[in-house]
Image (tube, rainbow, N blue to C red):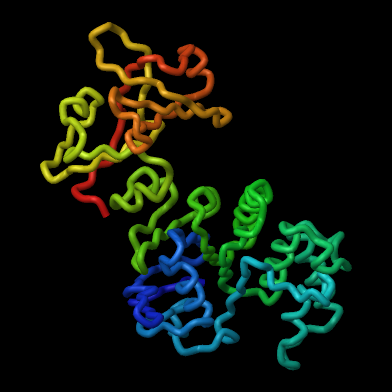
Amino acid sequence: MSIVLSNISKQFGAFKALDSISLDIAEGELVALLGPSGCGKTTLLRIIAGLEQADSGEVHLQGDNVTQQPVKNRQIGFVFQHYALFRHMTVFDNIAFGLRVKPRKERLSETVIHKKVHDLLNLVQLDWLHDRFPEQLSGGQRQRIALARALAVEPSVLLLDEPFGALDASVRKDLRLWLRHLHHELNVTSIFVTHDQEEAMEVASQIVVLNHGRIEQKGSPSQIYDRPANDFVSRFIGHTNIFDLAHDDAGWLKTLGLVATNPNDRIAHVRPHHIIVEKPTSAEAPTIVLQDWQHLGATIRLELNPDGRKAPESTIYAEMPNDRFHELALNRGDRVAMKVKQAHWFSVTA
């Protein structure tokens, strides 16, 4: 089911949660709403679901204006961060609940419900837990059961609000991969809210970056990361080094390969993996001090500091493969040559 939002605005007292949001989501997409706390992600999700009413604007599902329609008429499944499972019901009964409370003329027979629930439990790989109660499950298992319950009523749209936010990091990582594979299998238009950029990059086919109730950029993970629309997106997505022509020495920046091609450009953003670090080729070559490094598995993150710039905000981060780091045999305090391969330039900060 396609989703079209037109000029959605929402205010809570003096706080403007959403400021004229317009967004098209194609059928079958897995979209992440990404942004800092208070940017309007959950409010937008609740308006799509019908759990919140917009002050202005329209919500269209598959071409139909559902702005004034109640939740029950929107064919939407909703998965909350804290599972919202019924504690007094077994796993089986939790999933069957939505099917059993349908109007009598729409209700399936118990035989069909039984088969459908076990099919869903097999889909989320937890059929062996059908007779357990929620308190007997792990957090990751509860979240998968909550998802199965949402899928039981065959929603045309699936909405997930910080679905993995309450889970341990290792469980979150496993469930991200599982959710992506499940989505490929079901192809249900899905939107999930997250403030975790890694989660959005790993799971979503499209990312919508929100800030102060406005859309900063929409695109694929590679578009968002490789071609950020502005200073805010570049800072928020992934790690970036920031060089400011107004404060940094232009001559020093030029030796790094940082030269603005547009006269209005003032801020250069450089990803750590776009910095090349080598041993100096001559005594006269400009160098920078290797202050420290962190071992990130296959990657080493270097902390570089120009002379006289010992404040943390002046640290420049570079990344290189682990084997290259060992090949260079670098030590703390070494002077190294540094070059920038690529930068994103912006005229002003956000």
Residue at 67% across, 72% down: 150
In the depicted structure, whether residue 73 falls above or below residue 129: below
Residue at 66% across, 53% down: 175
In the visual, does 245 lie left or right of 140?
left
- Give the camera-side residue of 223 and 329: 329
In the visual, does 267 lie left or right of 135?
left
Residue at 40% across, 80% down: 12
Residue at 49% across, 76% down: 48
Which residue is the extreme one toward the right? 131
Residue 62 lies, in percent from the top left, at: 47, 76
In the visual, does 243 lie left or right of 322?
left
What is the quadrant of residue 153 in the picture?
Answer: bottom right
Residue 168 lies, in percent from the top left, at: 66, 51
- Give the camera-side residue of 184 and 331: 331
Check the picture and name the quadrant holding the C terminus: bottom left
In the depicted structure, whether residue 18 falls above or below residue 238: below
Residue 142 lies, in percent from the top left, at: 74, 63
- Give the camera-side residue of 12 and 24: 12
Residue 57 lies, in percent from the top left, at: 36, 82
